[in-house]
Amino acid sequence: MTETLRILIADDEDAMRLVIKRALREFSLSVPDVGVDVALEMEEAPTGEEAVERIAATHPDLVLLDLKLPGISGLEVLEQIKDYGEERLVIMITAYATIQTAVTATKQGAYDFLAKPFTPEELRSTVRKAIRHLILSRQARRLAEEKRRVRFEFISVLAHELKSPINAVEGYLNTLQEDFARNDPAIFDRIVGRSRIRLEGMRKIINDLLDMTRIESGRKKRDITEVDVVDVARMALESVAPTVLERGIEVHLDAPESLTMTADRGEIEIILNNLVSNAVKYNKDNGRVDVILRDTEGRTIITVSDTGIGTSPAEAAKLFNDFVRIKNTKTKHILGSGLGLSIVKKLALLYGGDVSVESQPDVGSAFTVSLHDAAYGETEASPPAQATASSDT
């Protein structure tokens, strides 16, 4: 990415302004830390008054400011522009630098000094240092602002997701205070059952949040061993057996007798439990779920497909982002944290793999996860590469 910075040269000597422009004409700077290449545009001001006007009008990023100017001095320029609010750096240029001048100028916002006479390389070196500082500080501020924005959005969504079950349980408890509910065992049992479902949903959100933060922070303790993925898949299918039986859903496991990989068993369980539970939860009654496990070119491939409600390509593209749940008339009664698929994505990246989805409305969805073996000796998870992932659980 190329970023063009504007430099104002404020000096009353025509020759000095020309020398500076020539020295910086072919100037280029790369800041690899943030992937930015810098180009310069230069403008001039021969007096302090004009310098103030140019700063107000064009908002330069860097000002090369002579201390001795006709009219108002460089220090007076600093004083007048200090309340402008923009982020800029000022390099004072002077042949009369003293400690007192340096202290005064620094207090008023000067970033650096350049003593006359100076060589072109000294000028470029000073400018290079200032620009690097400016670029990095702006990037740090942008990242901090983005972090605050993401944190605000995250907390807002989390508050919404937790508020809904709390309100529901509160409503159920209020109903239980009524005589008709206390005196009717059927109503009492139904309310208690619904409350337990809502509380279990809150527990799922909290557990998913803990999983997600441990993975993203790289502080998740890992136990890397030989894991039989087929055994993990069978256990995931057993966990949904009651729901499968109740709704008449057929479940098929297509896998070799054994398929081992080097992994943390708990992480593989999270992946399969999320995919299988979603395939059942978003399926149709009397539908079908297929779990296919393969070893392909040294990678473990997990595919879980269903004949459920499916989703559009636009909605599918969002499925792996935090707190994303497809909300429509078909899903509004299906509970979930909106984190499950996001966690699957993060874990897939942790194993040097990825996850994808193919889905059609009213036809079904197929999620495919590819995983490489983890390295032996790993005790903590390295933060996964940046994910554009989602969740529907």
Image: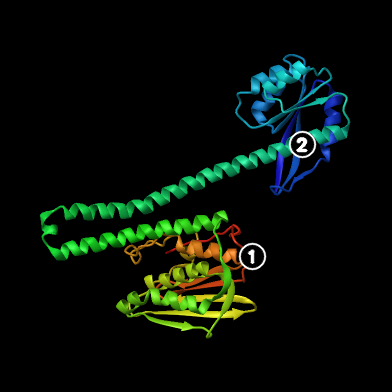
**Looking at the picture, how far across and down is residue 229, in whole percent?**
52, 76
What residue is pinned by disc 2? 129
- Identify the disc placed on residue 377: 1
- In the picture provided, is 298 more to the left or to the right than 359? right
**Looking at the picture, how far across and down is residue 244, in whole percent?**
35, 77
In the image, what residue occupies the spot 42% across and 77% down? 237
- Between 99 and 392, the one lying in front of the other is 99
- Identify the disc placed on residue 254: none
Q: Is residue 75 above or below residue 151?
A: above
In the image, what residue occupies the spot 58% across and 56% down? 218
The amino acid sitting under disc 1 is Gly
The amino acid sitting under disc 2 is Lys
In what element is the residue under mark 1? loop
Return the residue found at the far bottom: 257
**Looking at the picture, how far across and down is residue 230, in whole percent?**
51, 79
The residue carrying pointer 1 sits among few (fewer than 14), some (14 to 19) or many (20 or more) residues within 10 Å by Cα, namely: few
- In the picture provided, is 382 more to the left or to the right than 289? right
- The quadrant holding residue 54 is top right
In what element is the residue under mark 2? helix
